[in-house]
Amino acid sequence: MEITVRFPNLGFLFEYEDRTFSVLGFDITIYGILMAVSLLIGLGMILLCARWQKLNLNLCLGASISALIGGVIGGRLYYIAFSWSQFSGKSWKILCDIRSGGMSIYGAILGGVLVAALFCRLSRTSFWKMADIVCMGLLSGQIIGVWGNFFNREAFGEYTDSLFAMGLPMDSVQKSAVTKLMKQHLVTFRDMDYIQVHPLFFYESIWCLLLLLILLLYTWRKKFEGEIFLRYLAGYGLGKCVIEWLRTDKLYIPKTKIPVSLLVSAALFLICGIVATVRRILSKKREKVSRRRREERNAAEEKNDGSRLEDIHNFENVQDEFRDILEELDRAGKMVAEEDTESNESEDSKSAETAETTETEVSESVEDAEAAEAPASAETVESENKGTEGSAESAEAEPEAGPDDREDV
Protein backbone atom coordinates (compact mmCIF):
# COMPACT_ATOMS: atom_id res chain seq x y z
CA MET A 1 0.00 0.00 0.00
CA GLU A 2 1.35 3.41 -0.92
CA ILE A 3 1.78 5.56 2.14
CA THR A 4 2.35 9.29 2.04
CA VAL A 5 3.18 11.68 4.88
CA ARG A 6 2.36 15.33 4.37
CA PHE A 7 3.44 18.57 5.99
CA PRO A 8 0.86 20.81 4.32
CA ASN A 9 1.83 24.10 5.97
CA LEU A 10 5.50 23.56 5.09
CA GLY A 11 4.79 22.19 1.62
CA PHE A 12 6.63 18.89 2.20
CA LEU A 13 5.40 15.57 0.84
CA PHE A 14 7.10 12.25 1.68
CA GLU A 15 6.11 9.16 -0.29
CA TYR A 16 7.42 5.68 0.45
CA GLU A 17 6.26 2.12 0.13
CA ASP A 18 5.97 0.70 3.63
CA ARG A 19 7.56 0.46 7.04
CA THR A 20 9.82 -2.39 5.93
CA PHE A 21 11.84 -3.52 2.96
CA SER A 22 13.12 -6.96 2.01
CA VAL A 23 16.76 -8.05 1.55
CA LEU A 24 17.29 -11.68 0.37
CA GLY A 25 13.84 -12.57 1.63
CA PHE A 26 14.49 -11.05 5.07
CA ASP A 27 12.27 -8.15 6.11
CA ILE A 28 14.14 -5.19 7.60
CA THR A 29 12.25 -2.39 9.26
CA ILE A 30 13.29 1.21 8.83
CA TYR A 31 12.71 1.60 12.56
CA GLY A 32 15.37 -1.06 13.21
CA ILE A 33 17.84 0.61 10.85
CA LEU A 34 17.37 3.91 12.63
CA MET A 35 17.91 2.17 15.98
CA ALA A 36 21.18 0.69 14.70
CA VAL A 37 22.35 4.06 13.36
CA SER A 38 21.45 5.79 16.62
CA LEU A 39 23.34 3.07 18.50
CA LEU A 40 26.50 3.67 16.46
CA ILE A 41 26.23 7.44 16.87
CA GLY A 42 25.73 7.04 20.60
CA LEU A 43 28.76 4.78 20.97
CA GLY A 44 30.84 7.20 18.93
CA MET A 45 29.81 10.10 21.15
CA ILE A 46 30.60 8.08 24.30
CA LEU A 47 34.09 7.20 23.09
CA LEU A 48 34.69 10.78 21.95
CA CYS A 49 33.68 12.22 25.32
CA ALA A 50 35.77 9.57 27.11
CA ARG A 51 38.80 10.51 25.01
CA TRP A 52 38.23 14.21 25.74
CA GLN A 53 38.12 13.53 29.47
CA LYS A 54 41.01 11.01 29.29
CA LEU A 55 39.00 8.10 30.69
CA ASN A 56 39.52 4.40 30.16
CA LEU A 57 37.91 3.63 26.79
CA ASN A 58 37.49 -0.07 27.57
CA LEU A 59 35.57 0.66 30.77
CA CYS A 60 33.39 3.22 28.99
CA LEU A 61 32.66 0.75 26.22
CA GLY A 62 31.84 -1.99 28.74
CA ALA A 63 29.49 0.32 30.62
CA SER A 64 27.82 1.33 27.35
CA ILE A 65 27.25 -2.26 26.23
CA SER A 66 25.89 -3.27 29.64
CA ALA A 67 23.58 -0.23 29.62
CA LEU A 68 22.42 -1.18 26.10
CA ILE A 69 21.54 -4.72 27.14
CA GLY A 70 19.74 -3.51 30.23
CA GLY A 71 18.00 -0.80 28.20
CA VAL A 72 16.56 -3.25 25.66
CA ILE A 73 15.26 -5.56 28.39
CA GLY A 74 13.96 -2.73 30.57
CA GLY A 75 12.32 -0.87 27.70
CA ARG A 76 10.41 -3.94 26.57
CA LEU A 77 9.34 -4.98 30.08
CA TYR A 78 8.18 -1.44 30.87
CA TYR A 79 6.05 -1.32 27.75
CA ILE A 80 4.54 -4.75 28.35
CA ALA A 81 3.81 -3.96 32.02
CA PHE A 82 1.77 -0.86 31.17
CA SER A 83 0.18 -2.38 28.05
CA TRP A 84 -0.68 -5.75 29.51
CA SER A 85 -4.13 -5.72 27.98
CA GLN A 86 -2.51 -5.98 24.54
CA PHE A 87 -0.15 -8.81 25.46
CA SER A 88 -2.27 -10.86 27.83
CA GLY A 89 -2.41 -14.46 26.61
CA LYS A 90 0.20 -13.89 23.86
CA SER A 91 3.13 -16.22 23.27
CA TRP A 92 6.70 -15.53 24.39
CA LYS A 93 7.68 -14.98 20.79
CA ILE A 94 5.30 -12.05 20.53
CA LEU A 95 6.36 -10.73 23.93
CA CYS A 96 10.01 -10.70 22.85
CA ASP A 97 9.40 -9.30 19.35
CA ILE A 98 10.80 -5.79 19.39
CA ARG A 99 11.22 -5.41 15.64
CA SER A 100 7.77 -3.90 15.23
CA GLY A 101 8.16 -1.48 18.12
CA GLY A 102 6.76 -1.65 21.60
CA MET A 103 9.59 -0.06 23.59
CA SER A 104 9.55 2.61 26.28
CA ILE A 105 12.35 5.12 26.75
CA TYR A 106 11.91 5.35 30.51
CA GLY A 107 12.02 1.58 30.85
CA ALA A 108 15.18 1.59 28.75
CA ILE A 109 16.76 4.26 30.95
CA LEU A 110 15.82 2.40 34.14
CA GLY A 111 17.10 -0.95 32.89
CA GLY A 112 20.27 0.60 31.52
CA VAL A 113 21.00 2.38 34.80
CA LEU A 114 20.57 -0.79 36.86
CA VAL A 115 22.79 -2.98 34.67
CA ALA A 116 25.41 -0.24 34.22
CA ALA A 117 25.49 0.32 38.00
CA LEU A 118 26.10 -3.41 38.46
CA PHE A 119 28.90 -3.30 35.90
CA CYS A 120 30.53 -0.32 37.63
CA ARG A 121 30.26 -2.08 40.98
CA LEU A 122 31.96 -5.19 39.65
CA SER A 123 34.65 -3.22 37.82
CA ARG A 124 35.16 -0.84 40.78
CA THR A 125 34.43 2.19 38.64
CA SER A 126 32.60 5.38 39.59
CA PHE A 127 29.02 5.00 38.38
CA TRP A 128 28.36 8.73 38.33
CA LYS A 129 31.43 9.43 36.22
CA MET A 130 30.32 6.76 33.73
CA ALA A 131 26.75 8.05 33.81
CA ASP A 132 27.96 11.52 32.76
CA ILE A 133 29.61 9.95 29.71
CA VAL A 134 26.97 7.38 28.75
CA CYS A 135 24.07 9.83 28.94
CA MET A 136 25.70 11.94 26.25
CA GLY A 137 25.73 8.95 23.93
CA LEU A 138 22.14 8.12 24.83
CA LEU A 139 21.04 11.65 24.07
CA SER A 140 22.89 11.61 20.73
CA GLY A 141 21.17 8.37 19.80
CA GLN A 142 17.77 9.71 20.74
CA ILE A 143 18.11 12.53 18.21
CA ILE A 144 18.07 9.92 15.43
CA GLY A 145 16.14 7.12 17.11
CA VAL A 146 12.90 9.04 17.65
CA TRP A 147 12.52 9.35 13.87
CA GLY A 148 11.50 5.71 13.96
CA ASN A 149 8.13 6.93 15.20
CA PHE A 150 7.81 8.88 11.98
CA PHE A 151 8.22 5.75 9.86
CA ASN A 152 5.99 3.68 12.16
CA ARG A 153 3.34 6.42 12.23
CA GLU A 154 3.07 6.27 15.99
CA ALA A 155 3.61 8.43 19.06
CA PHE A 156 2.02 11.50 17.43
CA GLY A 157 0.11 14.29 19.12
CA GLU A 158 -3.35 15.75 19.10
CA TYR A 159 -4.86 17.59 16.16
CA THR A 160 -3.17 20.83 15.15
CA ASP A 161 -3.10 23.24 12.24
CA SER A 162 0.21 24.82 13.22
CA LEU A 163 3.24 25.36 11.00
CA PHE A 164 4.61 21.88 11.71
CA ALA A 165 1.28 20.04 11.35
CA MET A 166 1.78 16.51 9.94
CA GLY A 167 -0.82 14.67 7.85
CA LEU A 168 -1.03 10.88 8.17
CA PRO A 169 -3.34 8.48 6.34
CA MET A 170 -6.00 7.45 8.81
CA ASP A 171 -5.80 3.81 7.67
CA SER A 172 -2.06 3.64 8.52
CA VAL A 173 -2.34 4.47 12.25
CA GLN A 174 -3.76 2.65 15.24
CA LYS A 175 -7.43 3.33 15.69
CA SER A 176 -6.98 3.76 19.44
CA ALA A 177 -4.68 6.74 18.80
CA VAL A 178 -7.28 8.66 16.73
CA THR A 179 -9.32 11.08 18.82
CA LYS A 180 -12.67 12.72 18.17
CA LEU A 181 -10.96 16.03 17.47
CA MET A 182 -8.90 14.40 14.73
CA LYS A 183 -11.98 12.86 13.16
CA GLN A 184 -13.67 16.24 13.16
CA HIS A 185 -10.77 17.72 11.15
CA LEU A 186 -10.10 15.02 8.59
CA VAL A 187 -8.41 16.16 5.37
CA THR A 188 -8.91 14.38 2.06
CA PHE A 189 -5.84 13.98 -0.15
CA ARG A 190 -5.71 11.68 -3.22
CA ASP A 191 -9.00 10.16 -2.21
CA MET A 192 -7.68 9.25 1.23
CA ASP A 193 -8.59 10.62 4.65
CA TYR A 194 -5.72 12.20 6.52
CA ILE A 195 -5.50 13.20 10.15
CA GLN A 196 -3.50 16.32 10.95
CA VAL A 197 -1.46 16.01 14.15
CA HIS A 198 1.56 17.26 16.10
CA PRO A 199 4.83 15.64 14.89
CA LEU A 200 6.03 14.76 18.37
CA PHE A 201 9.04 12.84 17.01
CA PHE A 202 10.26 16.11 15.46
CA TYR A 203 9.71 18.06 18.66
CA GLU A 204 11.55 15.46 20.70
CA SER A 205 14.43 15.28 18.22
CA ILE A 206 14.90 19.06 18.27
CA TRP A 207 14.63 19.13 22.06
CA CYS A 208 17.26 16.39 22.41
CA LEU A 209 19.57 18.25 20.03
CA LEU A 210 19.28 21.48 22.03
CA LEU A 211 19.74 19.59 25.28
CA LEU A 212 22.85 17.88 23.90
CA LEU A 213 24.41 21.20 22.92
CA ILE A 214 23.63 22.68 26.33
CA LEU A 215 25.12 19.71 28.18
CA LEU A 216 28.23 19.73 25.99
CA LEU A 217 28.83 23.35 26.94
CA TYR A 218 27.91 22.61 30.54
CA THR A 219 30.31 19.67 30.80
CA TRP A 220 33.33 21.91 31.41
CA ARG A 221 31.52 23.74 34.21
CA LYS A 222 30.17 20.81 36.18
CA LYS A 223 30.87 20.87 39.90
CA PHE A 224 30.46 17.21 40.85
CA GLU A 225 30.39 13.75 39.30
CA GLY A 226 26.92 12.84 38.07
CA GLU A 227 25.76 16.41 37.49
CA ILE A 228 25.53 15.95 33.71
CA PHE A 229 23.46 12.80 34.16
CA LEU A 230 21.09 14.53 36.59
CA ARG A 231 20.78 17.54 34.28
CA TYR A 232 20.03 15.20 31.40
CA LEU A 233 17.22 13.49 33.32
CA ALA A 234 15.78 16.83 34.45
CA GLY A 235 16.04 18.43 31.00
CA TYR A 236 14.68 15.42 29.16
CA GLY A 237 11.90 15.09 31.72
CA LEU A 238 10.90 18.72 31.14
CA GLY A 239 10.61 18.28 27.38
CA LYS A 240 8.95 14.91 27.75
CA CYS A 241 6.26 16.43 29.98
CA VAL A 242 5.07 18.58 27.10
CA ILE A 243 5.37 15.74 24.58
CA GLU A 244 3.48 13.28 26.78
CA TRP A 245 0.81 15.87 27.41
CA LEU A 246 0.19 16.18 23.66
CA ARG A 247 0.49 12.47 22.94
CA THR A 248 -2.68 10.46 22.26
CA ASP A 249 -1.41 6.87 22.66
CA LYS A 250 -0.37 7.23 26.27
CA LEU A 251 0.53 4.43 28.64
CA TYR A 252 -1.62 4.57 31.77
CA ILE A 253 -1.17 3.21 35.25
CA PRO A 254 -3.38 0.10 35.39
CA LYS A 255 -7.00 0.82 36.34
CA THR A 256 -6.40 4.56 36.29
CA LYS A 257 -6.33 7.39 33.79
CA ILE A 258 -2.94 8.66 34.97
CA PRO A 259 -0.35 8.75 32.17
CA VAL A 260 2.64 6.94 33.64
CA SER A 261 5.21 8.56 31.35
CA LEU A 262 3.88 12.04 32.11
CA LEU A 263 4.10 11.29 35.82
CA VAL A 264 7.65 9.94 35.49
CA SER A 265 8.69 12.94 33.39
CA ALA A 266 7.41 15.42 35.96
CA ALA A 267 9.06 13.47 38.80
CA LEU A 268 12.40 13.37 36.97
CA PHE A 269 12.27 17.08 36.22
CA LEU A 270 11.49 18.05 39.80
CA ILE A 271 13.60 15.54 41.71
CA CYS A 272 16.69 15.54 39.50
CA GLY A 273 16.54 19.29 38.94
CA ILE A 274 16.33 20.01 42.68
CA VAL A 275 19.03 17.48 43.58
CA ALA A 276 21.40 18.80 40.90
CA THR A 277 20.81 22.41 41.95
CA VAL A 278 21.27 21.75 45.66
CA ARG A 279 24.40 19.70 45.10
CA ARG A 280 25.81 22.40 42.85
CA ILE A 281 25.18 25.07 45.50
CA LEU A 282 26.85 22.90 48.13
CA SER A 283 29.77 22.23 45.80
CA LYS A 284 30.21 25.96 45.22
CA LYS A 285 30.19 26.58 48.96
CA ARG A 286 32.76 23.84 49.47
CA GLU A 287 34.86 25.41 46.73
CA LYS A 288 34.65 28.80 48.43
CA VAL A 289 35.65 27.28 51.76
CA SER A 290 38.50 25.34 50.22
CA ARG A 291 39.57 28.43 48.23
CA ARG A 292 39.56 30.54 51.39
CA ARG A 293 41.56 27.92 53.25
CA ARG A 294 43.96 27.68 50.34
CA GLU A 295 44.36 31.46 50.29
CA GLU A 296 44.98 31.46 54.04
CA ARG A 297 47.52 28.68 53.63
CA ASN A 298 49.20 30.55 50.79
CA ALA A 299 49.24 33.74 52.85
CA ALA A 300 50.81 31.85 55.73
CA GLU A 301 53.36 30.32 53.41
CA GLU A 302 54.12 33.72 51.91
CA LYS A 303 54.51 35.11 55.41
CA ASN A 304 56.87 32.29 56.28
CA ASP A 305 58.73 32.89 53.05
CA GLY A 306 58.93 36.57 53.92
CA SER A 307 60.29 35.78 57.38
CA ARG A 308 62.78 33.44 55.77
CA LEU A 309 63.81 36.23 53.44
CA GLU A 310 64.17 38.55 56.41
CA ASP A 311 66.24 35.92 58.14
CA ILE A 312 68.33 35.65 55.02
CA HIS A 313 68.74 39.42 54.90
CA ASN A 314 69.58 39.45 58.60
CA PHE A 315 72.07 36.68 58.04
CA GLU A 316 73.57 38.64 55.19
CA ASN A 317 73.76 41.69 57.45
CA VAL A 318 75.44 39.58 60.14
CA GLN A 319 77.83 38.30 57.53
CA ASP A 320 78.67 41.88 56.60
CA GLU A 321 79.16 42.75 60.24
CA PHE A 322 81.41 39.73 60.74
CA ARG A 323 83.30 40.70 57.62
CA ASP A 324 83.84 44.21 58.99
CA ILE A 325 84.91 42.79 62.33
CA LEU A 326 87.33 40.44 60.64
CA GLU A 327 88.74 43.28 58.59
CA GLU A 328 89.16 45.34 61.75
CA LEU A 329 90.80 42.37 63.42
CA ASP A 330 93.08 41.99 60.43
CA ARG A 331 93.99 45.66 60.61
CA ALA A 332 94.52 45.41 64.35
CA GLY A 333 96.62 42.31 63.85
CA LYS A 334 98.73 44.05 61.27
CA MET A 335 99.19 47.01 63.59
CA VAL A 336 100.13 44.70 66.45
CA ALA A 337 102.54 42.86 64.17
CA GLU A 338 104.11 46.15 63.12
CA GLU A 339 104.36 47.22 66.75
CA ASP A 340 105.89 43.87 67.66
CA THR A 341 108.35 44.25 64.81
CA GLU A 342 109.31 47.73 65.97
CA SER A 343 109.57 46.60 69.59
CA ASN A 344 111.69 43.65 68.54
CA GLU A 345 113.96 45.93 66.58
CA SER A 346 114.24 48.31 69.55
CA GLU A 347 114.85 45.39 71.87
CA ASP A 348 117.50 44.06 69.50
CA SER A 349 119.16 47.45 69.44
CA LYS A 350 118.88 47.68 73.21
CA SER A 351 120.25 44.18 73.63
CA ALA A 352 123.08 45.04 71.27
CA GLU A 353 123.85 48.16 73.31
CA THR A 354 123.52 46.16 76.49
CA ALA A 355 125.84 43.54 75.09
CA GLU A 356 128.32 46.22 74.12
CA THR A 357 128.14 47.84 77.55
CA THR A 358 128.42 44.42 79.12
CA GLU A 359 131.45 43.63 77.00
CA THR A 360 133.02 46.93 77.90
CA GLU A 361 132.22 46.36 81.56
CA VAL A 362 133.59 42.84 81.37
CA SER A 363 136.74 44.04 79.64
CA GLU A 364 137.11 46.80 82.23
CA SER A 365 136.57 44.34 85.05
CA VAL A 366 139.05 41.99 83.46
CA GLU A 367 141.53 44.78 83.17
CA ASP A 368 140.89 45.79 86.77
CA ALA A 369 141.27 42.20 87.85
CA GLU A 370 144.47 41.88 85.95
CA ALA A 371 145.64 45.12 87.41
CA ALA A 372 144.71 43.92 90.88
CA GLU A 373 146.29 40.53 90.39
CA ALA A 374 149.67 41.95 89.31
CA PRO A 375 150.80 43.40 92.78
CA ALA A 376 149.26 40.44 94.53
CA SER A 377 151.38 38.07 92.55
CA ALA A 378 154.39 40.15 93.26
CA GLU A 379 153.71 40.02 96.99
CA THR A 380 153.11 36.36 96.73
CA VAL A 381 156.37 35.82 94.99
CA GLU A 382 158.11 37.82 97.64
CA SER A 383 156.40 35.92 100.40
CA GLU A 384 157.26 32.66 98.76
CA ASN A 385 160.82 33.75 98.36
CA LYS A 386 160.90 34.67 102.02
CA GLY A 387 159.40 31.34 102.94
CA THR A 388 162.00 29.49 101.01
CA GLU A 389 164.70 31.45 102.67
CA GLY A 390 163.30 30.76 106.14
CA SER A 391 162.99 27.06 105.40
CA ALA A 392 166.56 27.01 104.24
CA GLU A 393 167.69 28.64 107.43
CA SER A 394 165.74 26.26 109.56
CA ALA A 395 167.22 23.37 107.66
CA GLU A 396 170.62 24.61 108.35
CA ALA A 397 169.89 25.03 112.04
CA GLU A 398 168.42 21.48 112.62
CA PRO A 399 171.67 19.39 112.19
CA GLU A 400 173.22 21.19 115.04
CA ALA A 401 171.12 19.36 117.55
CA GLY A 402 173.03 17.22 120.15
CA PRO A 403 172.85 13.57 120.95
CA ASP A 404 170.50 14.18 123.86
CA ASP A 405 167.91 15.55 121.67
CA ARG A 406 167.85 12.50 119.34
CA GLU A 407 167.35 10.11 122.26
CA ASP A 408 164.45 12.03 123.57
CA VAL A 409 162.90 11.81 120.15
Image (cartoon, rainbow, N blue to C red):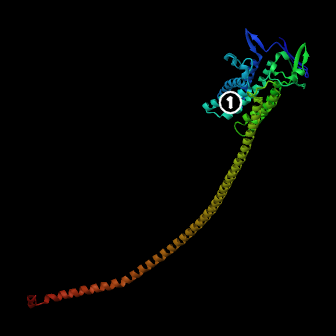
Q: Quadrant of residue 175?
A: top right
Figure check: 51 above or below 182: below
**Considering depth in this image, is 150 or 365 the residue closer to the camera?**
150
Q: Position of residue 348 (x, y in %)?
A: 52, 71
Q: Which residue is mark 1?
A: 113
Quarter holding the N terminus is top right
Rendered residue at 57%/66% (across/down) = 337
Is residue 166 visible in the rendered image? The answer is: no
**Considering depth in this image, is 225 or 185 the residue closer to the camera?**
185
Q: Quadrant of residue 86?
A: top right
Left or right side of 238 for 124: left
Q: Position of residue 389 (x, y in %)?
A: 24, 86
Left or right side of 156 for 189: right
Quarter holding the C terminus is bottom left
- Label 1 CA crowd tier, 10 Å (few <14, some 14–19, many 20+): many
Q: Position of residue 176 (x, y in %)?
A: 80, 20
Rendered residue at 12%/90% (across/down) = 401
Q: Quadrant of residue 380?
A: bottom left
Where disc 1 sits, the SS reads helix
Amino acid on which disc 1 is placed: Val
Rendered residue at 68%/16% (across/down) = 93
**Considering depth in this image, is 294 or 125 the residue closer to the camera?**
125
How many discs mark residues in the rendered view? 1
Left or right side of 316 for 376: left
Q: Position of residue 141 (x, y in %)?
A: 75, 25
Q: In this view, which residue lies farthest toward the front?
A: 255
Is residue 125 visible in the rendered image? The answer is: yes
